[in-house]
Image (tube, rainbow, N blue to C red):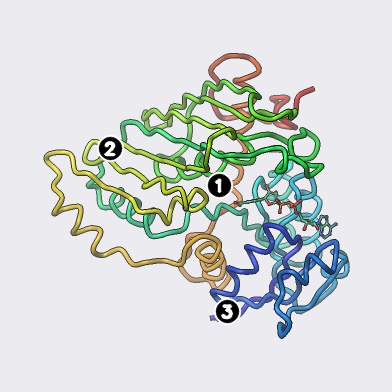
Amino acid sequence: MNKYQVAIIGTNIGAKHYEDFQKIKDRFNVHTLCGLTREAIDNILSKDTETKVSLNFDDVLKVKDIDIIDICLPPHLHFSACKKAMEAGKHVICEKPLVSSLKEVDELEKISKETGKIIFPVFQYRYGLGFSKLKALVKSGLAGKPLVASLETHWNRDKDYYSKHWRGTWEGEQGGAILSHSIHIHDLVSMILGPVSNVFAKLTTRVNDIEVEDCAALSIQMENGSLVTSSVTLGAANDTSRLRFCFEGLTAESGASPDKPYSPADDEWYFLPRSPVTQAQIDEVLSKVEEPQSWYAGMFDEIANKLDGSTSDEVTLLDARKSLEFVTAVYDSSRQNKNIKLQIDKDDPLYHSWLPK
Ligand SMILES: NC(=O)c1ccc[n+]([C@@H]2O[C@H](COP(=O)([O-])OP(=O)(O)OC[C@H]3O[C@@H](n4cnc5c(N)ncnc54)[C@H](O)[C@@H]3O)[C@@H](O)[C@H]2O)c1
């Protein structure tokens, strides 16, 4: 097992990355933490740390010992940062949303192939015991045919949240609740039910005085024929993420705990048998599920597995591409007020950007 040297770039969500790297110290060392101010970095690092401090991204890229650049910058900086990092010979972890168009994803894929460096997009919501249980039940065949799913991303974001200059704007954030908030839950659904076939989306801005959407109602059909409804708002009284899947053989429901809105995979999940499937059969499958590392630590663990050449379950560039293709289709549907069939081809103008003209 190798130990990888990481540089984290960005000190807000970057602090959470730092915290979770500490949980798997046998696999990663945070070599450098890079931000815009010394004060922000000092708030994260303890006094006795060996982690180095940098205020200059370009300098970090020159450090030979660093294997991975972990990009925790605002969305509009992701593409250029990923490109620079790979061209400097580094693997990349990059926060969601990976980039701002399908064209940019494809350009990054090309650079990744040319440089031999891997991009690991961030979807940390995938990792946790509850979700491992759901995946095991699907894999065992007990869940059977998927029928419908319903999703809620009901969070609370106010003026304070939008006081950061890049948030709430097309230019800085590149999108609203579809791109920044419900992107996670939609990724989870695709993991369980497979690719999206088509989507009808209603988007609106009703909560905050911002350019981008903060409420959505989506009607989605998956390629396997199952139907999904997704309700999104940033004007809920608290933060709740809820998922409910009805399969032929069982119904699976996340606990929607108010203390776990950002880690539904870690939540307590309920699995209810539907005849002829029995509780005993469900319990038998669940008894064999091992507790994984969760959240960012779970995701980082799988990245180390991939880099070690072991069996791995990392988030791939293709996963991020599918997620952004879905985002593109949602914006297209909302603007045209019509159902949009995926995929989005290269000759579609939205391939280059989903931003409004
Ligand atoms: N996966 C998740 O659950 C999750 C949660 C929150 C944010 N995010 C994503 O993480 C990204 C960052 O969001 P945030 O809320 O932390 O943003 P933020 O604006 O609060 O923080 C961004 C950080 O980047 C730093 N920075 C900006 N330019 C820099 C430069 N040139 N060199 C070095 N550092 C620089 C800033 O100092 C700041 O620390 C966004 O893409 C956001 O969507 C993901």
The yes-or-no answer for disc 3 within 8 Å of ligand 1 is: no
Where residue 66 appears, as percent x and y from the top left, is 74, 74
The tag on residue 247 is 2
Circles 2 and 3: CB atoms closer than 8 Å: no
Rendered view: 42 above or below 150:
below
Q: What residue is drawn where x is 22% and y is 44%?
A: 272
In primary-sequence order, the first of circles 2 and 1 is 2
Neighbours of disc 3 within 10 Å: few (<14), some (14-19), many (20+):
few
Front label number (2 vs 3): 3
The residue carrying mark 1 is 319
Percent position of residue 244, x then y: 36, 38
Q: Please name the amino acid that badge 3 sits on.
A: Lys
The Cα atoms of the two marked residues, 2 and 1, are separated by: 23 Å
Q: Nearer the viewer, residue 96 or 341?
A: 96
> How far from the left and from the top, in percent, is residue 210?
74, 30
Quarter location, residue 222 = top left
Picture coordinates of residue 226 (x, y %)?
36, 30
- Disc 1 element: helix
Identify which residue is drawn at 51% across, 39% down. Answer: 186
The quadrant of the picture occupied by the C terminus is: top right
Which secondary structure lies at badge 3?
Answer: loop
Considering only vertical position in the picture, is 202 above or below 269? Answer: above
Residue type of the residue flagged with mark 1: Asp
In this figure, which residue is indicated by the disc labeled 3?
Answer: 25
- In the displayed structure, would residue 66 be above or below residue 179? below
Q: Nearer the viewer, mark 1 or mark 3?
A: 3
Residue displayed at 81% across by 63% down:
35
The label number, if any, that marks residue 105 in the structure image = none
Q: Is residue 108 left or right of residue 312?
A: right
State how far apart marks 1 and 3 are (Cα). Answer: 27 Å
